[in-house]
């Protein structure tokens, strides 16, 4: 484990190579799993706003499920997650002509139609955060069915997971933290 300020991270976040290859995995992280993406209480109003704005672009099954059960499920004690349809697909999935699952929120953000990119847990994936006793614990959640194409792509291109996640990590912790984090990563890699 490594520590940067009040964040404890698994060492493999510093040493693993990874770069999403969505053309190969087809956006599996948005469609596979036994629960929706974890979200913070602060993100819930933004997700509800995104749903209202984007529901015409979403699958009708997803819209029906969200309108019946809610955009976000859970509670303060057990945590919150984005609702999914019965197949496990996030309600915000938008499919390309090639069958690739993409995030409708992120697509709208890139087009300048929405001012928020996506939940931080999605932005940081394949790293997952747990907040315990005032500290974040970050783990690299390697799932072969989801991540093997990203691992191969990272190896082929020489991209470390820590570099791939730069924008998401800066969004979460800031530039100063990220700079310290990269210094620690370089130290870990030199051992």
Image: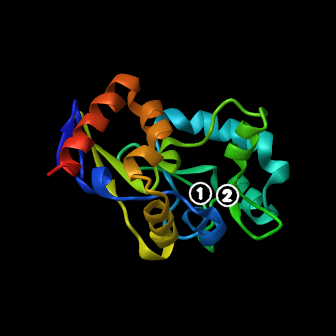
**Residue annotated with mark 2:** 91
**Residue at the (73%, 46%) spot, across then down:** 107
| Residue 4 located left or right of residue 78 | left
Whether tag 1 and tag 2 are in contact, CB under 8 A, the answer is: yes
Q: Name the outermost residue toward the top.
A: 176
Q: Is residue 93 visible?
A: yes
**Residue at the (83%, 66%) spot, across then down:** 97
**Residue at the (24%, 53%) spot, across then down:** 10
Residue 98 sits in quarter: bottom right
Q: Residues within 10 Å of mark 1 (few under 14, many from 20)?
A: many
23 up-or-down from 105: above or below: below
Q: Secondary structure at mark 2?
A: loop
Q: Secondary structure at mark 1?
A: loop
Q: N-terminal of the two: label 1 or label 2?
A: 1
User: Residue 102 at x, y = what percent?
Assistant: 69, 57
Q: Is residue 33 visible?
A: no
Marks 1/2: CA–CA distance: 6 Å
């Amino acid at each position: 484990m490594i520590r940067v300020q009040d964040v404890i991270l698994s060492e493999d976040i510093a040493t693993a190579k990874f770069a999403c290859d969505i053309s190969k995995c087809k956006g599996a992280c948005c469609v596979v799993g036994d629960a929706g993406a974890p979200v913070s209480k602060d993100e819930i109003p933004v997700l509800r706003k995104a749903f209202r704005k984007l529901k015409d672009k979403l699958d009708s099954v997803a819209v029906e499920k969200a309108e019946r059960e809610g955009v976000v499920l859970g509670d303060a004690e057990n945590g919150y997650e984005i609702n999914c349809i019965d197949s496990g697909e996030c309600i915000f999935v938008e499919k390309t002509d090639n069958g690739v699952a993409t995030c409708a929120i992120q697509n709208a953000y890139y087009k300048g139609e929405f001012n928020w990119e996506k939940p931080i847990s999605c932005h940081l994936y394949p790293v997952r955060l747990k907040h315990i006793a005032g500290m974040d614990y970050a783990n690299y959640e390697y799932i072969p069915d989801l991540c093997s194409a990203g691992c191969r792509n990272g190896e082929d291109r020489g991209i470390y997971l820590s570099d791939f996640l730069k924008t998401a990590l800066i969004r979460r912790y800031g530039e100063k933290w990220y700079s310290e984090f990269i210094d620690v990563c370089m130290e870990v890699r030199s051992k």
